[in-house]
Amino acid sequence: MKEPYEGKSDWPAGNILWFAVMIWFSSSLLSQTAYLAIYGLPYDATALLKSLGPVYYFVLILELAMWGGLFAMGGYKFYRSRQDPMMNPATTPVSQ
């Protein structure tokens, strides 16, 4: 008899990072579209961020950290996909 499927109690960090990147990209696109529809020209994102004052640096560091995390996870996955499957017991099929 099969055991009922039990879902994972936590999401992998990679999924959460991808969701964060997609939300950031979508919100930027929608924000730019709304501004363009109202004023007829795109806003200058750099001038807008600099108008935040010292908070600008926090936003800049947060965005750089998100991109760094995305590239690091992508690089790690690429590295793991290139390893010999016999060296990595997590990816070798289990015979029964």
Image (cartoon, rainbow, N blue to C red):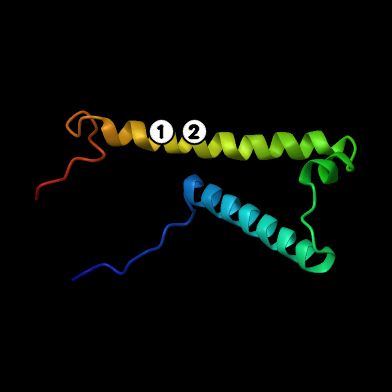
Q: How far apart are marks 1 and 2 (CA)?
A: 6 Å
The quadrant holding residue 78 is: top left
Q: How many marks?
A: 2
Residue depicted at 40% across the width and 62% down the height: 7
Circle 1: residue type: Tyr
Residue depicted at 79% across the width and 47% down the height: 44
Q: Position of residue 96 (x, y in %)?
A: 9, 50
Residues at discs 1 and 2 in contact (Cβ within 8 Å) = yes
Residue depicted at 46% across the width and 37% down the height: 73
Q: Which of 51 and 78 is in front in this view?
A: 51
Quadrant housing the N terminus? bottom left
Q: Position of residue 57 (x, y in %)?
A: 80, 33
Q: In this view, does 32 lie to the left or right of 6?
A: right
Secondary structure beneath label 2: helix
Q: Which of 19 and 26 is in front in this view?
A: 26
What residue did someone put label 2 on? 72
Q: Nearer the viewer, residue 28 or 65?
A: 28
Packing grade of label 1 (10 A; few <14, some 14-19, many >=20) is few
Packing grade of label 2 (10 A; few <14, some 14-19, many >=20) is few
Circle 2: residue type: Ala
What residue did someone put label 1 on? 76
Secondary structure beneath label 1: helix
Q: Which mark is residue 52?
A: none
Q: In this view, does 66 lie to the left or right of 18?
A: right
Q: Position of residue 19 (x, y in %)?
A: 55, 55
Q: Where is residue 69 in the image (x, y as percent from the top left)?
A: 55, 36
Q: Outermost residue toward the front?
A: 40
Q: In this view, does 22 lie above or below 74?
A: below
Residue depicted at 78% across the width and 36% down the height: 58
Q: Which of 32 and 41 is in front in this view?
A: 41
Q: Is residue 75 left or right of residue 57?
A: left
